[in-house]
Image (tube, rainbow, N blue to C red):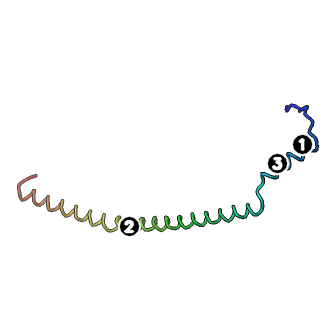
Amino acid sequence: MPKKSNKNITLNDLAVMMAKGFAEMVTKAEFNDLRADFKKEISRLDQRLAGLEFKVDELRDVLTHFEDVDILNLQKRVKELEQELKQFKKQAGFK
């Protein structure tokens, strides 16, 4: 249970406290400036994000091409080399 304060606050004390509180508040002009700065920063971040998305899409395309074409070509080459090695072993008398 909160303790009750024995301190009496006068109207003048209350007015001073309220004046200090209002002095720390942001004016409408300051708020609008902060809001404009915030919007600029969000716009800048959106542009950077769009650039990153583009780069990720490019990487995805490269990897897809690598998977689809290059890996299949490598698998084909390995299979051909295995067949040639098998024939070489057979001709050389290896088992």
Q: Position of residue 20 (x, y in %)?
A: 82, 48
Query: How far apart are the alpha carbons under marks 3 and 1?
Result: 11 Å
| Horizontal side of residue 74 vs 67, given as left or right | left
Front disc: 3 or 2: 3
- Label 1 near label 2: C-beta < 8 Å? no
What element does badge 2 sit on? helix
Cα gap from disc 3 to disc 2, whole angstroms? 61 Å
Q: Secondary structure at mark 1?
A: helix
Q: Residue at x 46, y 64 (%)?
A: 56
Instruction: Find the residue positioned furthest to the left.
Output: 92
Which quarter of the figure is the N terminus placed in?
A: top right
Q: Which residue, given by chain and number where applicable, does mark 1 sit on?
A: 13
21, 93: nearer the viewer: 21
Q: Earlier in the sequence, mark 3 or mark 1?
A: 1
Residues marked 3 and 1 touching at CB (< 8 Å): no
Percent from the top left, x then y, of residue 11?
Answer: 94, 44
For image coordinates 86% across by 31% down, the residue present is 3
Residue at point 5%, 56% (across, down): 92
64 or 30, nearer to the observer? 30
Give the side of residue 30 with respect to residue 22, left or right. Answer: left
Q: Which mark is residue 20?
A: 3
Residue in the picture at 49% in, 64% down:
52
User: Count of labels shown?
Assistant: 3
Amino acid marked by disc 1: Asp
Mark linked to residue 62:
2
Left or right, 79 with reference to 8: left
Expressed as whole percent of the image width and height from the top left, the position of residue 46 reads 57, 66
Q: Earlier in the sequence, mark 3 or mark 2?
A: 3
